[in-house]
Amino acid sequence: MKRCSKCGVEKELARVAKGVCRECEAARIRARRATNPAQHREENRKYRAAHPVRYRELARARRAANRERERERQRRRYADNPELVIEGIKRSQEACPGKHRARCLLHNAVRRGEIVKPDACQSCHEPTPRHRLHGHHWHGYDRPLDVEWLCSICHGTRHRKTDAAP
């Protein structure tokens, strides 16, 4: 047991670092952020620039741990700024016309019933609602109907593996 120098409460040794407990240190940081938000944003920007891989890993873990909150945030973003979201989609379509064409052809084939989505992810075999399955163009976009049906987690993993390959 160790006594916190801020609140004076005795706490487990693991919860007190440099004489201050985690709760008091967290309160100090929150107060510092509230009094000087511009400086805090600048420090975060420098950290992200200096540690891009670490920052991406932390962001990915945070989104995975708070999946529902992240989905709600995205819904609110779309509801508040539909024109910005649509503009981003149009930019993406203009930047990669082959990808856009492949997506449209696949979507239309599914809609017409020419291609039937399975009931489970073809990678992890977890039962997945059909509207949540992604068509992964694993042979490239020049074969638009040749896809592997993956859940969002397996689809992201597959892209990270292929993007990391030389």
Image (cartoon, rainbow, N blue to C red):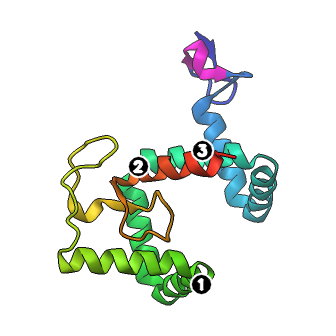
Kind of residue indicated by mark 2: Ile
Kind of residue indicated by mark 3: Leu
Please say whether residue 41 is one of the residues in the magenta stretch.
no
Note whether residue 12 is visible: yes
Segment tinted magenta in the rendering: 10-16
Q: Mark 3 points at which residue?
A: 58
Query: Which marked residue is nearer to the observer: mark 3 or mark 1?
Result: 1
> How far across and down, in percent of the image, does residue 35 sit?
72, 59
> How far across and down, in percent of the image, does residue 62 sit?
51, 47
Q: Mark 1 points at which residue?
A: 91
Question: Residue furthest toward the front?
Answer: 143
Nearer the N terminus, badge 3 or badge 1?
3
Cα distance between the residues tagged 3 and 1: 28 Å
As drawn, 71 above or below 86: above
Nearer the N terminus, badge 2 or badge 1?
1
As drawn, 11 above or below 88: above
Q: Name the residue under label 2.
A: 153
Near-viewer residue (3 or 97): 97
